[in-house]
Amino acid sequence: NTPLHELDPEIAAAVDAELRRQQSTLEMIASENFAPLAVMEAQGSVLTNKYAEGYPGRRYYGGCEHVDVAEQIAIDRVKELFGAEYANVQPHSGASANQAALFALAQPGDTILGLDLAHGGHLTHGMRLNFSGKQFNVVAYHVDGETGLVDMAEVERLAKEHRPKVIIAGWSAYPRQLDFAEFRRIADEAGAHLWVDMAHFAGLVAAGLHPNPVEHADVVTSTTHKTLGGPRGGIILAKKDFAKKLNSSVFPGFQGGPLEHVIAAKAVSFKVAASEEFAERQRRTVDGARILAERLTAPDAREAGVNVLSGGTDVHLILVDLRASELDGQQAEDRLHEVGITVNRNAVPNDPRPPMVTSGLRIGTPALATRGFTAEDFAEVADVIAETLKPSYDASALAARVRVLADKHPLYPALGE
Ligand code: PLP
């Protein structure tokens, strides 16, 4: 029963340092968030000790009576939250959920149609080195070079031409809402299944701020740790016709024992996501992203060569276009890091620079909204970012402004400083 800092001081020091980093900097990676203490408590519980292969009521191990309760609560809550007929809460991650979903809908060698990674898609939607790209015949659609919006005419054309088994709608870096009804129409005409990956925007859907893909898709996958604000993990929702195939694809298809401690933490986060407080936080998240887009399209930002793809945002992130800036994506990411703001560089469509450098940034607001940032705070953050990306920037003055914002909204105060 030795505490961590005595048993393993090296790991304890890394954990403490990471807590201080999260507390003292502004986290603006669009796929990150801060889980509530209650979520982390469930995740750090004795449920980690339990083997529970199978599903509630049908396990291959004894002693599952309590994890059955927790897993069933997680299933019931997430079905209610998104209005789904079926839910599987066992996928260890978003990529695991996607793998299980894809293999339930298609066979290796079948054609799949997804958004190109370089245009905002995810690795698991058909990237060459991923299982999806290695085992399936991938056809990719794109965003329009002018508008920055998904080219639905291309989606329809490719669907008619290639007759994919699965059409994938969803993204990792896209600042607008997708037209799920139109994807459904195209899928029906092509005889394809429609799979929506809502990993990024699930929290907005839960709060009623984004169309709900569950109404249109055969299968919907998500992570639980991005806008949804829960533990790191994945889920699959679907029409009940797909239940059997999806359950056997997750277990025994791809996974062994489920992470019952994480599933309990997912249940807690679904309870939180059904609250008015959560909806209010998601409204601040979207408002914050809009404020960033407005300020980073203002004339002086444009003079510094900074622009915002698609001209704005409907969601929790913006994509900054640096093609006209003296900075590339790597340099801009490093500069923001220097003043205490964490973002990630991101390719813009038809990026002239290599993927490790890029000409863009992806900037998200979920973590700061969770921290309590208001519209006024987001305006200040936007101004600090705009100043930092100008040729003449004063790193120490900007870092001081970041510290003021971080101090104004303490993170995990109960965990100490
Ligand atoms: N799907 C989308 C759209 C994502 O953006 C991500 C992660 O970035 C994933 C799936 C994969 O999630 P994980 O990192 O949990 O495997």
Image (tube, rainbow, N blue to C red):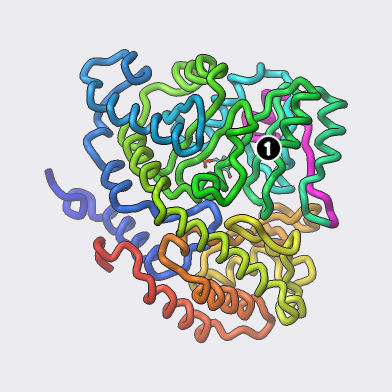
Q: Residues within 10 Å of mark 1 (few under 14, many from 20)?
A: many
Q: Is residue 226 visible?
A: no
Q: Residue at x 74, y 64 (%)?
A: 311
Q: Is ligand 1 within 8 Å of the beta carbon of the residue shown at mark 1? A: no
Q: Is residue 333 magenta?
A: no
Local secondary structure at mark 1:
strand
Q: Residue at x 43, y 78 (%)?
A: 403
The image quadrant that residue 183 belongs to is top right
Q: Position of residue 121 (x, y in %)?
A: 68, 43
Q: Which residues are magenta?
A: 125-146
Residue on which the image places disc 1: 169
Q: Residue at x 16, y 50 (%)?
A: 3
Q: Position of residue 253 (x, y in %)?
A: 50, 17
Q: Is residue 133 magenta?
A: yes
Q: Position of residue 38 (x, y in %)?
A: 28, 49
Q: Residue at x 40, y 42 (%)?
A: 270
Q: Looking at the figure, which quarter contains the C terminus?
A: bottom left
Q: Is residue 195 visible?
A: yes
In the depicted structure, whether residue 294 falls above or below residue 161: below
Q: Looking at the figure, which quarter contains the N terminus?
A: top left
The amino acid at mark 1 is Ala
Relative to residue 293, is residue 350 drawn left or right? right
Q: Quadrant of ligand 1?
A: top right
Q: Nearer the viewer, residue 175 or 324?
A: 175
In the depicted structure, whether residue 106 falls above or below residue 84: above
Relative to residue 3, is residue 250 drawn left or right? right
